[in-house]
Amino acid sequence: MVRQKATSPDALIDRFLNYLLVEKGLAQKTIEAYSRDIIRYRNFLAVNKSSAFSEEDTPLILKHLILLRKSGLKARSRARHLVAIRGFYRFLVQEKILQNDPARLIDLPKSGLKLPHVLSKEEIERLLNAPDTDKALGVRDAAMLELLYAAGLRVSELINLKLQDINLEAGFVRIFGKGSRERIVPIGAHAREKVSTYLKTVRPKRLKQATSPYLFIARAAKPMTRQGFWKLLRRYAIKAGLKKNITPHSLRHSFASHLLEGGADLRAVQVMLGHVDISTTQIYTHVTRDHLKKLHQKYHPRG
């Protein structure tokens, strides 16, 4: 049975989005994606029935997913829609607006396992050595690339790092990731050396008389934009002779895979990446297993 409550669908959606922000601590972009998907579903319901959400919505959820598929939406995008819808109905049950969840038995669309794009250690070496450290910008860029790979950062985390977030003496960097969740990640000697050189020789000259809380600065003491970093990364990838489609996330993927190949514990890698769910980190084990299989075939006498 549905508990009658004088609450409009739009008000329920607003309550759900506020719950994601305040209680779940999700990032703004993630909440915006949830909002788009839920509103699209609400609009579908308005065309097909009364606009109230109910426990009898299972057939309508399935019909909505079928229409999304017919519209050309790929399995991964349809899965994202269903994740939003399931989360919304779970919230309605949690708030005692519904007694039963009509989405609980609907499986995610099969999208296949999309393995992350990983650079080899030799390719990473070429990329990290691409900046010309005889030039000021090259020193800065070398430090940014080295830190991105050393700590497995997202590009947004890298460009928003503050001076106070890095401790070169202790060898740690503090990161505020998705949903403003804080994590502490160790950094190695190479990254510490590159960042130290940048701080001593380049950053003061680029600031001139200005001040900035940001670790890496572009023009007018402002932090670099995501687009700006993408451009310089592409430039260095070309210079390094890498023909793959290199993105900032390629270095994050490589960080995780190289750690696991070296014997790191999956749980430790999860913490360093800032993944809430270890199943997100487990995708890297598929890359590592493939690597181990190739090694076995190459070196085992009966491979």
Image (spheres, grey):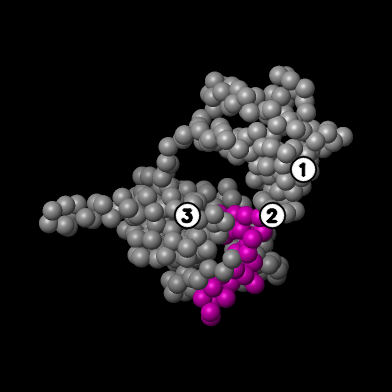
Disc 3 crowd, CA 10 A, few/some/many (<14, 14-19, 20+): many
Write the residue at 43% across / 41% down.
Answer: 114
The first of marks 2 and 3 along the sequence is 2
Write the residue at 62% across / 55% down.
Answer: 178
Disc 2 crowd, CA 10 A, few/some/many (<14, 14-19, 20+): some
Mark 3–mark 1 Cα distance, whole angstroms, equals 33 Å
Residue found at the very far left of the displayed protein:
301
- In this figure, which residue is indicated by the disc labeled 3? 281
Query: Looking at the picture, how far across and down is residue 183, in whole percent?
Result: 59, 66
**Does 149 appear in magenta?**
no
Per the rendering, the mark at residue 25 is 2
> What span is colored magenta in the figure?
155-182
**Does 175 appear in magenta?**
yes
Query: Looking at the picture, how far across and down is residue 30, in whole percent?
Result: 65, 45
Q: Quadrant of the N terminus?
A: top right
Per the rendering, the mark at residue 96 is 1
Image height check: is 128 above or below 33?
A: below
